Amino acid sequence: MRILITGANGMLGEKCSLKMSEKHEVFASDVQEDLQFKCPIPYTKIDLTEPKQIKAVVEKFEPEAIINCAAYTDVDGSEDNQELARAINVQGVQNLIDVAKPYNAHIVHISTDYVFDGSSGPYEEDDEINPINFYGKTKFESEKVLVESNLPVTIIRTNVLFGNSQSKAANFVNWVVENLRKGETIKVVNDQFGNPTWVNGLAEVAQKVIEQKLEGIFHYGGEDYLSRFEFALEIADVFSLDNKLIEKVTTRALSQKAERPYKAGLISDKLKKSLDIKLYSIKDALKHMKAEIEETEEQKDAESQ
Ligand SMILES: NC(=O)c1ccc[n+]([C@@H]2O[C@H](COP(=O)([O-])OP(=O)(O)OC[C@H]3O[C@@H](n4cnc5c(N)ncnc54)[C@H](OP(=O)(O)O)[C@@H]3O)[C@@H](O)[C@H]2O)c1
């Protein structure tokens, strides 16, 4: 199957590129000039706000499926840069739809539990939508344009993605590990709840969705529902780091620019019933991630010698 991946240099885009190219013909794209990890697949720059760039690749490659991993993902930045966030997260998706229409390509789009207000999570697909920050609003608007597109569409909402990546170092797990390794104290909120999702699991799900042409709105999260503080403790445990360096703090005390949903997170039962998939426990996912990091570091060491 021919699969176009947007946002390929992002955390999820990299994993989808690596996984799907083992079995399918994959074309990768992102806003950067080059692919930023090792994978023998074709790559062209596509900025989703530039319809001509999308058109050039889609006309040449004629994808049967497009997995949209591209987004403006800076939650606090979205409050200050609302025009840009909307241009990428909403107009960018509309641009993708407009170009994909003549090819009837199946669009798989990634959304978020931030479309909910966090008053009563974890959430099912039909629960009331009520985003409380601008990022969440743009992601919900992106869902709406897709639902109205008359194309074969799948929206997978996920939350708190983490995993090893060659190109993107920044996710919560890396941040915790790096600071604790340096012996630095970190403040982590104990009042935001979710079910952190291993990015490899989400890439597996996206591939199955494409192969089985599953359409609709689905939730996919990890097996364990816990606070960010508890997640940090799990990370310290698996990476054998000092958990006394992790300080509890409330969301209010952090004074972040964007409001955060407190009881967020997702119930994945609908997807579990539709596909034969596994939800990963935090412990298992972190152990796999640690092994992958060690492997990447060994490869880098070998290459530098
Ligand atoms: N990470 C999470 O915890 C989380 C939770 C729920 C849902 N999601 C959703 O999951 C998806 C993947 O997230 P992720 O964590 O893999 O994100 P990510 O690492 O930030 O990757 C997003 C990629 O899109 C690129 N991009 C930005 N603007 C673009 C544009 N105009 N055209 C094309 N590409 C552009 C980014 O480039 P730059 O880095 O240069 O901007 C980046 O490479 C997103 O839709 C996100 O909303 C993520």
Image: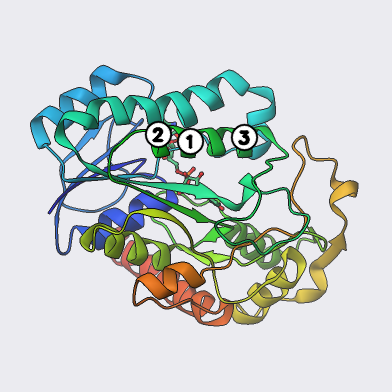
Crowding at label 3, few (<14), some or many (≥20) Cα neighbours within 10 Å?
many
Whether residue 245 is visible to the viewer of this picture, yes or no, is yes
Quadrant of the rendering where the N terminus is positioned: bottom left
Q: Report the front residue among 209 and 298.
A: 209
Upstream in the sequence, badge 2 or badge 3? 3
Residue type at the position of mark 3: Lys
The picture quadrant where one finds residue 206 is: bottom left
Rendered residue at 55%/57% (across/down): 125
Q: Give how far apart the Cα atoms at labels 1 and 3 are.
A: 11 Å
Q: Is 30 above or below relative to 172? A: above
Q: Which amino acid type is marked by label 1?
A: Lys
Residue 269 x %, y %? 50, 72
Q: Position of residue 86 (x, y in %)?
A: 53, 25
Q: In the image, which is nearer the foreground, mark 1 or mark 3?
A: 1
Expressed as whole percent of the image width and height from the top left, the position of residue 106 reads 25, 45
Callouts 2 and 1 close, C-beta under 8 Å: yes
The residue to which callout 1 is attached is 144
Labels 2, 3: front one? 2
Q: Is residue 186 left or right of residue 178?
A: right
Question: Secondary structure beneath disc 3?
Answer: helix
| Residue at (47% x, 28% y) in the render | 90
Residue labelled 2 has its Cβ within 8 Å of some atom of ligand 1: no
Residue found at the far left of this picture = 60
Nearest the camera: 189 or 178?
Answer: 189
Q: Which mark is residue 137?
A: 3
Q: Is residue 270 above or below residue 41?
A: below
Q: Which amino acid, mark 2?
A: Glu
85 vs 175, nearest the viewer: 85
Disc 2, SS: loop
**Residue occupied by mark 2:** 148
Q: CA distance from mark 2 to mark 3?
A: 17 Å
